[in-house]
Image (tube, grey):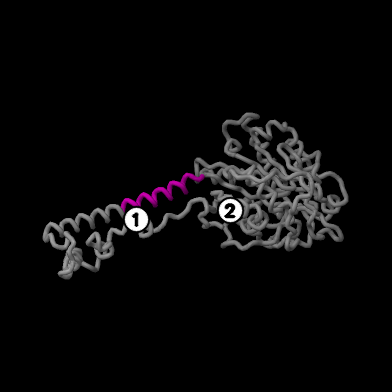
Amino acid sequence: MAGDHHGIPSPPSPSSRVPACGSRRGGVSARAAFSPSIPFRWSLRSKSNHTSNDRSPLSQSGVGGERTRTRVALLCALFLALYTVTSVSARNTAQSSNHLYIMYLPGLCAWQHSDPYCYGQVNAANRARATFGTLRAAMDRQHLVRHELYFSYNPSSAAHYTVNDTHQTVARAASVLEKGLRTAVQEDSQASFVLIGHSLGGVVAASWAVSDGRQYGLNPSSGLLSRVRSIITFDSPLRGIRPGLASNLVTRAFGGAVWYSLQPDSETIKEIEFFPTSWWRSHGHLHTVANTADRIVPASESELADSHVVHDASCARDLIVISSCHGAVLSDAPLNNWVVCHWVPGPSSCRPAPTATPTPSATPAASPTATAPSITPPPIPSSTPIGGGPTATPVT
């Protein structure tokens, strides 16, 4: 998608828009006038050497006609030069004026091959593109011009991380996010951000927001949080993962420091819930999607601030004999289109809001065999892997 200049249409070639200065009526062809291999004076003579049936005033005016044709050629050259410079300048200005950065934060890698990208050195860009493929497609349909950043759980690499890196504490992951955002600001002093997280990724984004809020106060006018225009979470346990059949099974299977961070009585969850809803709406700009069919993160655990509750139950079996539906909202095309229209700055055309009634959703074409708070939709075609954080991929 990068490289699809939807937001900035390419200017038409000069030959399709400018007058045909090199037509026979003008007396001089632009091709002959600008060709380095054909002497300009020769082109004038060849054009003035018409047959005796040519009755145009220019062809019979001698030296005066030749001078007129020279002036026409020079004017054409000047016009074409100005047109080209203006078009290129306008296009570059439109591109450089785009300072919106979308940071995608996928969820937990439960174990090796728990989803198609969770093995070995996980490519941060490819996994993020696949996880949020439906949402990114909705952005393209709305012609949203943006730069894309891909979160890496690895403090030492913006391009790759391992399965174990996703098992670190939420606080450590939030510090990695801080580093990535600061790098983007160093490269673009006018950068503004939209953070989009699924499951654990949404908790990391919210935890980072409250840490920035603590540092700069409840009404920050400085700090990176002042640059954030939206934080959007899908199936994220912002209120902690409470005891339940599915959650207990997952916790026992994986363990790790991250699970202590996701307990309702952990410091991470307490800090997120400490900030009032009014703060989350006015300064945190938090928007949450909750799914009543999710058996890993129930809707009651993922609702906070500006929340939309849906019932996406169209999902394959992925938890032994049951369907967890954790991540089903990521494949819900109507829902993702609504999220882009209402919660991502830029688009203006919106569809009716989703309700708590069943929402038409696309069944994922393939589901990972494992259960985790980070079930990823099937991969979509993508370009060569690009690292997240410091490296932004412009999408137009």
Image coordinates of residue 149 in percent, x first then y, are 59, 50
> Is 96 included in the stretch rendered in magenta?
yes
* Residue 204 seen from this side: no
The amino acid type of the residue labelled 1 equals Val
Residue with the mark numbered 2: 140
Q: Is residue 217 above or below residue 251?
A: above
Q: Residue at x 79, y 42 (%)?
A: 301
> Is 140 included in the stretch rendered in magenta?
no
As rendered, which of 352 and 7 lies closer to the eye?
352
Q: Which mark is residue 18?
A: 1
Q: Which mark is residue 255?
A: none
Q: Is residue 391 above or below residue 121?
A: above
Q: Is residue 303 left or right of residue 141?
A: right
Image coordinates of residue 277 in percent, x first then y, are 72, 33
Q: Residues within 10 Å of mark 2 (few under 14, many from 20)?
A: many
As rendered, which of 74 and 273 lies closer to the eye?
74
The image quarter containing residue 275 is top right
* Residue 83 seen from this side: yes
Image coordinates of residue 89 in percent, x first then y, are 39, 49
**Label 2 secondary element:** helix
Distance, label 1 to label 2, CA atoms, is 31 Å
Q: Which residues are magenta?
A: 81-98
Q: Tell me, yes or no, whether the two marked residues, 1 and 2, touch with CB atoms within 8 Å.
A: no
Q: Is residue 350 left or right of residue 7?
A: right
Instruction: Give the dominant element type of the magenta stretch: helix, strand or loop.
Output: helix
As rendered, which of 18 and 307 lies closer to the eye?
18
Image coordinates of residue 100 in percent, x first then y, are 55, 45
Residue lying farthest to the bottom in this orientation = 51
**Label 1 secondary element:** loop
Q: Residue at x 81, y 42 (%)?
A: 300
